[in-house]
Amino acid sequence: MASTERSSARRRLLAATAALSCAALVGGTGTAAHAAGTRGTRGTRGTAWPAGFPLPACFQPEGIAIGARPFAYFGSLAGGDVYRASLATGRGSVVVQGLGAGHPTVGLKIDPRGRLFLAGGDSGEIRTADARTGETEQVYATGGTFVNDVILTPGAAWFTDSFAPQLYKLLLTRDGAPKSVETVPLGGDWAQGDDFTANGIERTPDGSALLVVNAFADGGRLMRVDPRNGTARAVDLGEARLPNGDGLLLLGRTLYAVQQWQNAIDVFRLNASGTHGTAVARITDPRFRIPTTVAAWGDRLYLPNARFDVEPTPDTEYDVVAVDRV
């Protein structure tokens, strides 16, 4: 079975036994995870911050988001919970209780007001929640097949669908409140496979377009999508391909692309419009166990290990790994 097919098969277990065995265990427990022994970057007070830390057993992480403060938020594939951990200590707890089995949280982002935008996977949902109160604010039924990842832009939150050639645009008010969802069909160079296709999403450095991983087209391509009409064009990355491309992170003109089954992050330098990029590095680490998404704080990148190579049980261990930025 190809790596993208294996990844897809793992995620399709969400509505089956894995979700049933884990959701009740993790959901709403407020369980605190203790910091790992590995220490690394020093905080502002001179204390060492952990270079990795555990998540609750059976949590089944996929997405990560870091906002304006040194806290990371993780979504659970099992029951949709959102877990917040301090980057300074590695300790954390569930801050948003999920809707239960069949309502996973895949990709997620947090805005400056503390509002979380959650991709609902095979539930087809887009959800918003308040990270401070834990309240789930809105639930939108897209009618989609697998709402995977999300990026925030001025005026909208954009979501990918891994099994349909379309994006979802959640319109926002001036103060960032969600309004309504529009479906934007993908055209141009977009090629839709029979299995997992669209995955991670970002903006171009100049903010004029969206960048979307297409794991199917030509061995795995990065696509530049015009947000006005959904027209996609393949980004020129030379010989580089993203067959296992998952989460994307843009810092300036540096794009980090997680290649989950390769246990690696491929790093590209993009031009301003995002039409061309050059491969500059590959980050690997022996602690990687099928990482999926990436977020940054300071000079570090943080990645949850999704461990799609094992069947989840109530005792399955999950963790987060921190590595240096390029």
Image (cartoon, rainbow, N blue to C red):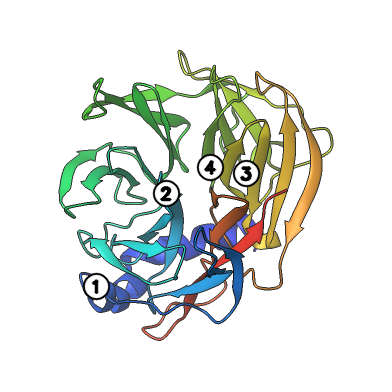
Residue positioned most to the top: 228
Q: Which numbered disc, 2 or 1, marks the residue that appears first in the sequence?
A: 1
**Horizontal side, residue 250 vs residue 175: left or right:** right
Separation of residues labelled 2 and 4 (CA atoms): 8 Å
The spot of residue 39 in percent (x, y) is 59, 74
Q: Amino acid at mark 2?
A: Gly
Q: Quadrant of the N terminus?
A: bottom right
Q: CA distance from mark 2 to mark 1?
A: 21 Å
Residue labelled with disc 4: 200
Q: Earlier in the sequence, mark 2 or mark 3?
A: 2
Distance from disc 1 to disc 4, alpha carbons, whole Å, reads 29 Å
Q: Earlier in the sequence, mark 1 or mark 4?
A: 1
Between the residue at mark 2 and the residue at mark 3, the CA separation in whole angstroms equals: 17 Å
Q: Are marks 2 and 4 in contact (CB under 8 Å)?
A: yes
- In primary-sequence order, the first of circles 2 and 4 is 2
Q: Is residue 159 above or below residue 298?
A: above
Dot 4 crowding, Cα within 10 Å, few <14, some 14–19, many 20+ = many
Residue at numbered disc 3 = 215
Residue at position x 44%, y 70% from top?
Answer: 89
Work out how far the residue at label 4 is from the one at label 3, CA to CA, in angstroms: 10 Å
Q: Is residue 303 visible?
A: yes
Image location (x, y in percent) of residue 87: 46, 62
- Of circles 2 and 1, the one toward us is 1
Q: CA distance from mark 1 to mark 3?
A: 36 Å
How crowded is the residue under tag 2: few (<14 C-alpha within 10 Å), some, or many (20+)? many
Q: Residue at x 71, y 73 (%)?
A: 286
Q: Which residue is mark 1?
A: 30
